[in-house]
Amino acid sequence: MNSDLLEIANLPVERTVKCAHCGLVCEKEVVLSGENSFCCYGCKTVYEILDENNLCEYYSLDESPGVSLRHVREESFAFLDDPEIAKKIITFQSDSFSRAQFSIPNIHCISCIWLLENLKRLNSGVIRSEVNFSHRQITLDFNPSKISLAAVARLLSSLGYAPLITLEEIKPTAALSKALIIRLTVAGFCFGNIMMLSFPEYLGLDNSDAQLRTLFSYLNLLLVMPVVLYSGQDYFIAAWKSFRQKRINIDVPIAVGLAVLFLRSAYDILAHQGPGYLDSLSGLVFFLLIGRWFQSKTYDSLAFDRDYKSYFPLAVNKKIDNDWNPLLVHHLEKGDIIQIRNMEIVPADSYLMSKQAFIDYSFVTGESKPVHVQEGALIYGGGRLIGQPAEFVVEKKIAQSHLTSLWNYETFHKNEESRYKKMIDTVAQKFTWVILGIAAMTAIYWHFVSPNQMWLIFTSVLIVACPCALALAAPFTFGNMLRVFGRNGFYLKNADVIERMAAIDSIVFDKTGTVTQGASTITFNGTLSSEELGMVKALTASSVHPLSRTIAKSIAASPMPLSTFEEVPSEGIAGVIINHQLKIGSARFVGFEKVITESQSMVFVSIDGEVRGYFKIETSLRNGLKELIAKINTKLSVFLLSGDNPSEKGRMQSVFLSDKGLYFNQTPLDKLHFVSNLQQNGHRVMMVGDGLNDSGALKQSDLGVAVTDDTGIFTPASDGILLGKQLKNLNQFLALSKSAIVILKIAFGISFLYNFITLSFAITGNLSPLIAAILMPISSVSVVGFSTLAVNWVGERAFRNKL
Amino acid sequence: MEIIILLIFISLTIAIAFLGAFIWNMKTGQYDDTYGPSVRMLFEDKKTESKDANPHVK
């Protein structure tokens, strides 16, 4: 191919040019290469790769088979280097051979199959690849010493076949559904044959055919064996397990029903008393299994995996051209240089570049004594830096799942069980006994009225009364809501948090960094040389406190090297810079004695014990906050806790519309006590803070929310991490959590109503076990479908105009 | 009447044979991908007539 001819032409769209790779109409730009035109560089690159490797047959198999690369983001798949994640994808591993399975939604035609199965011609590390077209999956054998798993993913991605990798465990559903289908087939086969052999019985044999009747009955008994012992074994196993654990679960009534029908029929046949109910029994199992299969299909398509798209909104300072820029942690790459400040979390396994650092591994190991590490040491992701800031070079990206699991570490769990989970557990326990009781009473009644029908009705009642839909409603409703939240910048710890959020009646805001953010005006009263300004910048840049960050940002001078660093929460920061002792913070902290009152936040600076002046900072309110407070004020009691002096009381009063809930000069301990006092008065408290000097209060509260802008402060004590710019939508989130509860209640209602109606039909003998077996899965599917659709609908509606 | 008994056994035997065949199909994964194999057999396994220094070894 002649790539000299390559040029970009901004052709006017007089004639439509179609991309030679993906077949889409080239819109803005047309990339020319030889006689072919492409819609983007991505498509052209793929074409060139294929052309170089004699793989252009790709284009002759199907018309424009390529996948457009126009909207594809470059991804590094670095997380696949993490053995924990790799384990979910790799099915077999040895030194020179690995087998991995990827899900690739882009597979769509013959050419895709052909290209993906010829991957070995593109990279010698790939040994064999096989596409499963129906499941959009590829099974890849590769040599891990030649090509890493991440490199395989990048290779696929570079061709436009980006693999889809989800955070949750990939369940071995395929094997499971295969066994289910075989069970279903066996049940169907036996059901059909038993019906055929029962046919003479339906028409009525006369007594002269007694021999034939016996033969048919025995054949039926033989045929029903695989149905009960093989197809229906899951129900018996589940029931047996529940007996062993001395807990009755919802499989018990079904197992009892099946056993009763089988034993009764066997007795009838062996004692020559009649044909039994084998046709009903086998049909019952057949329809139960169809229902199960249908259910698993539905759940698969409604599954609510937390995927890699709902990332932690956690940022870190990355060095770009000698400057530090905040970057979301999941964009970090190996080799990036990052700066971690006091209290920030090291987001990735990295090597220390600074001379020394103190790392607190309490999130990872539970041991809270900081570890002293020297230059060049490897720091594991999840450690927290204490004291002087340090620079690191990223060695290996941390897995999202790792952070999530740190977050869900037991120590940080609140001792409050989900109310609905508890309710379902007790209901399931009691319900089973109630069902067994109702069924027994129904059986006794029908024993006198019509003993023939007794066993069938007994089974119908057992089957139809099962409240399976109940157990599914909560996980599906909350799980989907969790995903809606994540998509909108509110990352929740787990699904139970939504339930707690809905019950909130008080909100406590932290002021600095939450209600206020950044500065509108900043002035320095006093004199500082440019060298001294550099010192101040060095010291303030080391702290993640919002005021420090504001000051550091406002100083243009280049920072001086910092030798020691110390931060006293709610007081200030101190450090030594080129033999000068610097203190920056509150008047008390630096030793400023004169009392002055002004309306702005003041940050004092002292150098070598001499107070040099103070920064006057007028912080600006966060965007949309006033509107938010106005909205939630009517529904909830709102409080403000600030560690600062009451100089801003007037302004806060105008935001919070009263001065009742405003408290100033609060130490971290005060904040904690304030929250626990509210709780003792029966309030359910949500604490919104930045996680700096209010982590105690965050943990104490019923729902702690850490607001984050461009810092890497990871507060495991919090229940949710909210992007700063989404704080204005807190109202929406609260409303959504309430909607989730409403949806859940409706789902419960549907489920109960369903059971009630069908049960009444069953007790009166108007429902055969077959119909019961058909109705049961329909109820589960309708409940799950309802909650999934409803949650996504309200989520969509709440945020349609908000982003 | 004997003939009916005979017929029933023959029909059951044939039906069980088909059931067995189906189970075998399922277990060996013949239903996993119902589209792929139908096109895979049409791909020409060309000897790479190329500069490629890595001819494809069976």
Image: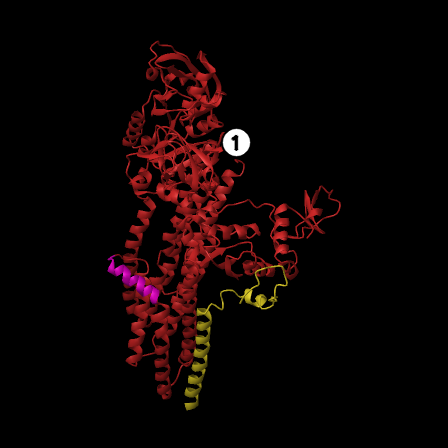
A721 with respect to A255 (left or right): right
Task: State left or right for residue A399 relative to residue B54.
Answer: left
Q: Residue at x 37, y 15 (%)?
A: A606
The residue identified by callout 1 is A321
Choose between A211 and A546: the one closer to the eye.
A546
Chain A rendered in what hue? red
Indicate the chain coloured yellow by its letter. B
Magenta-colored segment: predominant secondary structure: helix
Identify which residue, A783 or A368, lies in the foreground.
A368
Look at the image and give the residue range highlighted in magenta: A233-246
Q: Which residue type does callout 1 highlight?
A: Asp
Q: Residue furthest right?
A: A14
Mark 1 falls on what kind of element? loop
Residue A288: percent from left, percent from top: 40, 64
Q: Along the horizontal axis of the image, is A431 left or right of A767?
A: left
Residue at position x 38%, y 44% in the image: A402
Foreground of the two, A300 or A36: A36
Farthest residue in the bottom direction? B2
Res A639 quadrant in image: top left
Q: Residue A544 placed where, x, y %?
A: 40, 28
Give percent across and percent down for residue A576: 36, 21
Q: Quadrant of residue A657?
A: top left
- Asked whether residue A518 is drawn in magenta, I would say no
